[in-house]
Image (cartoon, coloured by chain):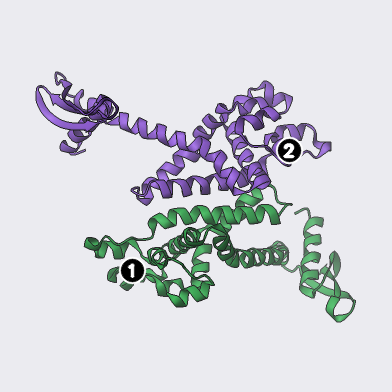
Chain colours: A purple, B green
Amino acid sequence: MEDLQKRIGYTFKNTDLLTEALTHSSYANEHKAKHIKYNERLEFLGDAVLSIVVSDYIFKHCPELPEGELTKLRASLVCEKTLFEFAKQIELGKYLVLSKGERNNGGAERPSILSDAFEALIAAIYIDGGIDPASKHILNFVIPAIKNSKKKKLNDYKTALQEIIQKNPGEQLEYVLVGESGPDHNKHFVVEVHLNSNVIGKGGGRSKKEAEQQAAREALELMGY
Amino acid sequence: MEDLQKRIGYTFKNTDLLTEALTHSSYANEHKAKHIKYNERLEFLGDAVLSIVVSDYIFKHCPELPEGELTKLRASLVCEKTLFEFAKQIELGKYLVLSKGERNNGGAERPSILSDAFEALIAAIYIDGGIDPASKHILNFVIPAIKNSKKKKLNDYKTALQEIIQKNPGEQLEYVLVGESGPDHNKHFVVEVHLNSNVIGKGGGRSKKEAEQQAAREALELMGY
C-alpha cells in the first residue's frame, strides 16, 4: 500500500480509507463474519467528486465549448473505459483485495472492477484530505487525457477526408508543402491538399502534420461537412 | 435581482454571473446580434456541483445506507421534478429572462426551464463564492427534502397495510391506543393494530401517528412483507 501511495503521490492520514477503497465486495462476502468494509459506498461518492473536478476544469479551460460539447467531453472522461485506462496507469489491479474466486476469474483486470476501485480511491483521498488533493490526483490523469483526445481529434480531419474521397474510385488526394517560414524554434508551414491536381484546401501550422490537418479541415468545410 | 439575492441569502460579487444564470437561450436567440450569454454552460457545471454536495451530505449523514440506496436517494434529490420544486420555493420563474415567445408559452413555469435555471444558479454561486456558499445554498433545499421523504416513507407502512387488507372484502383494520406514558415534552405512545379484533401488530413512538406506523410495520413483518 505504501507503494501505491507513492505512485499516486498522496499519503493517507487514515490508511483504513485506502484499504476500504481497494476492497471489493467479493472479499467482504467471502469473509462475511468479519463485517469487512468494501468500496461500493466510496465508489458512489468518488463518482461525484470526479464529476465536479472534471466539470470545473473543462468549464474553465474550454471557454469556447458550448454546453453540448462540454457534456460530451465530460462523459468521455468519466466513462468506464477511460477510468479503466487510468487505473491501469497506476497498476491498481495489483493492490485490489478480491475474493479467491474473483481473483482467479481475472477480476483484477476487469474494467468494471478497476474503474469502480479508481472512483473509490478518489473518494478515499477526498475524505482523507479534502477536495484539493482529490482534485490534484484526478487532474494528473485527466489533463493528459484531454490533450490526447485533442490530438486524436486533430488526426481526424485527414482521416475523415480520406474516407470521403475513397468512396469515389480513381480520385486521388495529395498533400503539397507550399510554404515554410520562421526560425527553427518557431516554424510555420503551409500545406495545400490537392484532389486530382485541384487545390481543395489550404492550411497552416507549426508542423507539417498540423498544416495538413488544417488543409484537410478546410477541404471538408468547402465540401459542406 | 436584489430581491432574489435576499431570498437565497447570497449576495453576488459579480452580478453578471447571476444574470447569465437567469438568462434562457431563447432570449439570447431573440437578440442574436448582442451575443448575450445564456445559462446552458452554467447548468452543465451546476449539475456537478449539486451532485457532489448532495453525495457528500448523504454519504456522511446516512452511514447505514448501502450504495444502491444512496444512488436512489441522490437520483430522487437531483431529478428535474425535485429541482422544479426547489425553484418554485424561491419563485425563480419571476426572475427568468426569456424571449417573448417563450414567456407567452408559459416558459417561466416549465419544469425543464426552471430546473435548468436552478442548476445554473448553483454554478453562478459556486464560481462567484466557491464551494462553501454553493453548498450552503443547496443544503437549504436538500435537507428539508430529505426529512420530507423520510416522513413520507414513514407514512407508507399504514398505507401499505391498508392496501393489502382491503383486497379481502369484509376485513377490518383498527388502530387502538393501549398505552401513554411520560411527561408532556417526552410522551411515549403504544398502539396496537387489530384485524377483525385480533392483534396483528404493536408499536411505540413519540406520537400516536408514529406508534401507529410502527404497529403497521410489525403487522407487515408478521405477514411476511
Q: On the rendered structure, is A139 left or right of A163?
A: right
Going by the numbered disc 2, the residue's amino acid type is Thr
Q: Position of residue A100 (x, y in %)?
A: 73, 24
Residue at mark 2: A15
Three-letter amino acid code of the residue under disc 1: Leu
Q: Residue B136, located in which quarter of the rendered image?
A: bottom right
Residue B98, label in figure: 1
Q: Residue at x 59, y 39 (%)?
A: A119
Residue furthest out toward the left: A198
- Answer above or below: position of B173 versus A187: below
Residue occupying the point 52% across, 71% down: B8
* Outermost front residue: A183
Q: Residues within 10 Å of mark 2 (few under 14, many from 20)?
A: some
Tell me the element at label 2. Answer: helix
Q: The numbered mark 1 sits on a residue in which chain?
A: B
Residue A219: percent from the left, percent from the top?
18, 33
Position of A1 relative to B197 (above/below) = above
Q: Nearer the viewer, residue B168 or A77?
A: A77
Q: Is residue B82 left or right of residue A70?
A: right
Residue with the most extreme top position: A170
